[in-house]
Amino acid sequence: MSQFSSIIRVGLIGYGFAGKTFHKPLLMAEPRMRIIRVVSSNREKVHADLPGMTVDANPATLMASKDVDLVVIATPNECHAPLARQALLAGKNVIVDKPFTLTLAQAHELVALAAQQNRLLSVFHNRRWDSDFLSMKNALTIGLIGRVTHFESHFDRFRPVVRKRWREGNEPGAGLWFDLGPHLVDQALCLFGLPLAVHGDLMMQRDGALSDDWAHVVLEYDRHRVILHASLLAAGGSPRFVVHGERGSILKRRPDVQEAQLLAGMVPGDDGWGYDPDPLLVYDTNGLEQETPALMGDQRRYYAGVVDALTDIGPNPVPPTQALAVTAVIEAANRSAREKSSVRLDFTKEEIAAWS
C-alpha cells in the first residue's frame, strides 16, 4: 500500500541551470506533484518564477520539514552524494541530478543506505526520453540494420570562450565528461548493457580551460564498439548518432529539441513539445537512403515514472543500481585517461541483473 494518498510534495535543492531549466518545469508538468520548498541563495530568482514559494537558505531546513515527501537535488556535482546521504538519513525519498556521485564508493554507499532506509532513490537520467535516443532505440530493437557493429553517440557544441561557472572550473565534478558523459553512458548501457572495458581520452583544448572540454571514450564489447564523444569546439556540430550494422547504417543528424524548447520558455505539454522534425536516415546494404520519422520525445515521463514508483504503480524509472553502473563507467574513463590504458570493469551479479 502506498504511503501517498494525494499529491507528492517536493523540496527542490538548487535553483541554478538544472533546477530552473529542467526540474522546475518538468515537476510542475506532473499533476501528481507539487513543489512546496526550494533551497537557494537567490530568493528573488526563485520568487520571479514561483511567487510565494518557501525559500530556504540551508538544505537542512528543507530536509527537516515533515511536509516534504521527496527531495530533488540539483546542486553542483560535488554536493550530490553528501546531500543525498543527508536526505536519506532524514527519511526522505530522493532524486539526484546526474552525475549520481563523483566516485563509485559514494554510489555504493547511497544504494545501500536507500535500501536500509526503505526509501526511493532515483537519478535524473532524463535523456532516456529524448526523441533522438527513443528513435534510435526503436530502430535497433526492431533490427532495422541487423546486429550492430559500430555505434557513435555525440554531444558536440561550439562554446570557445570559457565561462565563469562551476561546470567549467577546476573543482571536483567539473568538466565536460562529468557534465555530459553520464547522459552518453546511460544511453549506451540502455542499448547494449554493461561493457567489458573502457578506454577514455580527456583533454583541455580551449584557451584558459580549467577542466576537460573534450572527451572521447570507447566502450568495449565482444563484437562491437561504442564511441562516446563530447566537445565544446565543434562549430556546426556533428551527427548525434552514427550506427553501422550487418544490414545497413543509421544516421541521426540533429539532437532532441526539449532543452532548446525549455530555454525558449516553452512549457512541457505545449503544442509541439518534443516534436523532432529531423528523421533517421537509414541506409541499406546497397547504400540506398530512406527516411524514418523520429519518435516524439517527452522527458515528463521521468517524473511520471517516479510518481508511479512512489505510489506502487510501476518501477523506479532509473533505479540506483543502474546509475551506479554509469558511475563505474565514468570513473573507469577518468582512470583510463590518466593511465593511458583500457580499464576492465568488474560488476556484481546484482549490478549485472539491473541491466538484464
Image (cartoon, rainbow, N blue to C red):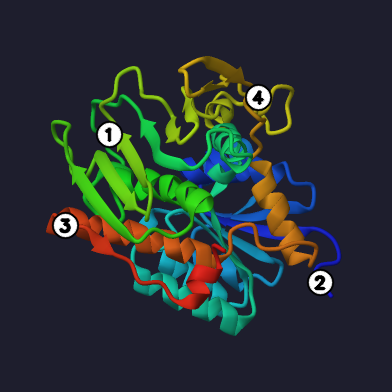
120 is higher (above) or lower (below) than 163: below
Q: Which residue is labeled 4 in the image?
A: 275
Displayed quadrant of residue 9: bottom right
The mark nearer the N terminus, 3 or 2, is: 2
Look at the numbered disc 2 and give the secondary structure of its residue: loop
Give the secondary structure at mark 3: loop
* Among numbered discs 3 and 4, the one appearing first in the sequence: 4
As shown in the figure, which amino acid type bears the numbered disc 2?
Ser
How far across and down, in percent of the image, does residue 174 sit?
Answer: 29, 50
> What residue is shown with label 1?
163
Answer few, some or many: residues within 10 Å of disc 1's Cα (few below 14, many 20 plus, some between 14 and 19): few
Q: Earlier in the sequence, mark 2 or mark 1?
A: 2
Ranked by sequence position, the earlier of labels 2 and 4 is 2
Q: CA distance from mark 3 to mark 4?
A: 41 Å
Residue for badge 3: 341
Category of crowding for the residue at label 2, using alpha-carbon neighbours closer than 10 angstroms: few (below 14), some (14–19), many (at least 20): few
Confirm or deny contact between disc 1 and disc 3 (CB under 8 A). Answer: no
Give the foreground label among 3 and 4.
3
Instruction: Give the label, 2 or 1, closer to the camera.
Output: 2
Tell me the number on the disc at residue 331. none
Q: Amino acid at mark 4?
A: Tyr
